[in-house]
Image (cartoon, rainbow, N blue to C red):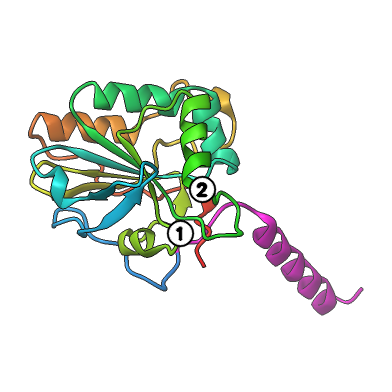
């Protein structure tokens, strides 16, 4: 094989690996909101059928968690109990935790309202509500590219954190222990009125399965 052919083969192989991978390169199709400014306003239907809006949460700290139950990165945090522990810790302190599903119909992670509620029950998850975003409108509004992709909004509606749940971008459950949890740190800073030390990180995980 000539050097040129070998390079072409390696390039094609690399692209194939990327295509098969669950990891995502952030999309430029929409711009992610900036931290330190007002979080994008939205309203979406919860699995209960009730409409939930960001405006209704005024006066409370809010966490947005993009999820896809079939994603191995999401499974890492749920199967280890890490996500549920963080949800319970946060909601126990009065934080509103909204889990958002932006998978389009027919794609990985798409679920009906009933299926989503069953997942919440069987995984012993503890969000305030699970929001269904099958058109991807809310996800694109926030520039959510991965699952999990996490956001923290303060009591006056300012986006204070956007990015990964922690600093261990792997699917290994054992990596949860000892990881730097960016979301917990952001919540602690916001609750105490302090600036978030690391307001933006690169989210890792599976691509959000938009239309």
Check disc 1 and report the residue beneath it.
Answer: 134
Residue 138 seen in render = yes
- Compared across the picture, whether 196 is left or right of 171 comes to left
Residue at 41%, 73% in the rendered image: 29
Check disc 2 and report the residue beneath it.
Answer: 112
Residue 139 on image: x %, y %: 37, 58
Q: Earlier in the sequence, mark 2 or mark 1?
A: 2
- Give the image quarter of residue 38: bottom left
Q: Is residue 158 above or below residue 137?
A: above
Residue 35 on image: x %, y %: 20, 54
Q: Which residues are magenta?
A: 1-26
Q: Quadrant of the N terminus?
A: bottom right
Cα gap from disc 2 to disc 1, whole angstroms: 10 Å
Residue at 66%, 62% in the rendered image: 19
Residue that extends furthest to the right in the rendered view of this protein = 1
User: Is 8 a magenta residue?
Assistant: yes
- Compared across the picture, whether 83 is left or right of 187 comes to right
Q: Is residue 6 above or below residue 85?
A: below
Q: Residues within 10 Å of mark 1 (few under 14, many from 20)?
A: many
Q: Is residue 171 above or below residue 27?
A: above
Residue at 13%, 30% in the rendered image: 191
Residue 6 on image: x %, y %: 83, 71
């Amino acid at each position: 094989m000539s050097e040129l052919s070998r390079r072409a083969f390696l390039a094609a192989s690399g692209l194939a690996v990327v295509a098969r991978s669950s990891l995502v390169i952030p999309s430029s199709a929409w711009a992610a909101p900036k931290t330190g400014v007002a979080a994008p306003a939205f309203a979406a239907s919860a699995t209960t059928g009730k409409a939930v809006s960001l405006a209704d949460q005024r006066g409370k700290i809010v966490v947005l968690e993009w999820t896809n139950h079939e994603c191995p990165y999401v499974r890492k945090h749920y199967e280890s109990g890490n996500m549920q522990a963080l949800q319970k810790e946060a909601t126990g302190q009065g934080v509103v935790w909204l889990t958002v599903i932006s998978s389009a119909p027919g794609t990985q992670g798409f679920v009906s309202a009933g299926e989503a509620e069953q997942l919440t029950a069987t995984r012993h998850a503890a969000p305030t509500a699970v929001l269904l975003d099958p058109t991807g409108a809310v996800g694109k509004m926030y520039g959510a590219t991965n699952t999990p992709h996490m956001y923290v909004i303060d009591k006056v509606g300012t986006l204070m954190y956007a990015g990964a749940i922690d600093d261990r971008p792997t699917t290994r459950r054992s990596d949860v222990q000892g990881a730097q949890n960016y979301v917990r740190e952001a919540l602690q800073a916001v609750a105490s009125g302090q600036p978030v030390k690391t307001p933006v990180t690169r989210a890792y995980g599976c691509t959000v399965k938009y239309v």
